[in-house]
Image (cartoon, rainbow, N blue to C red):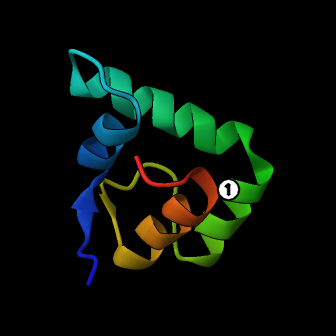
């Protein structure tokens, strides 16, 4: 079972960086630049600026981006 996680934690897994803010910025840019990913996340309830990814949104990320 996948639990909700902080966006910063997920971002750090996909984009390791010394600062969590850098990873988060990079993940948000990736989401904004990929229309397929963005649409799938919105259908899963994603809203720009949220601080927590739901389990459903994490599954979308894994399906499209693969496991970190």
Q: Residues within 10 Å of mark 1 (few under 14, many from 20)?
A: many
Q: Residue furthest bottom?
A: 1
Expressed as whole percent of the image width and height from the top left, the position of residue 47 reads 51, 61
Q: Say what secondary structure mark 1 lies in.
A: helix
Q: Nearer the viewer, residue 7 or 47?
A: 7
| Residue with the most extreme front position | 67
Residue 56, x across and y down, in percent: 44, 78
In the figure, is residue 49 to the left or right of 29?
A: left
Query: In the rendered image of this protein, does residue 11 appear above or below residue 20?
Result: below
Q: Give the tally of numbered discs.
A: 1
Q: Quadrant of residue 5?
A: bottom left
The image quadrant that residue 3 belongs to is bottom left
> Would you place residue 54 above or below residue 14 in this image?
below
Residue positioned 23% across, 45% down in the render: 9
Look at 58% across and 32% down and name the residue there: 29
Q: Residue 17 appears in which quarter of the rendering? A: top left
Which residue occupies 27% across, 42% down?
8
Residue 43: give x, y in percent of width and height: 64, 76
Residue at figure coordinates x 68%, y 56% from the top left: 37
Q: Residue furthest top?
A: 18
Kindly identify which residue carries mark 1.
38
Instruction: Look at the image and tell me in which quarter the N terminus lies.
Output: bottom left
Q: Position of residue 33 (x, y in %)?
A: 72, 37
In the displayed structure, does residue 46 sit left or right of residue 38?
left
């Amino acid at each position: 079972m996948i639990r909700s996680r902080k966006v910063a934690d997920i971002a750090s897994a996909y984009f390791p960086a010394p600062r969590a803010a850098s990873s988060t910025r990079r993940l948000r840019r990736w989401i904004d630049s990929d229309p397929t990913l963005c649409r799938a996340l919105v259908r899963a309830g994603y809203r720009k600026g949220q601080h927590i990814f739901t389990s459903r949104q994490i599954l979308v990320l894994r399906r499209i981006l693969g496991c970190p």
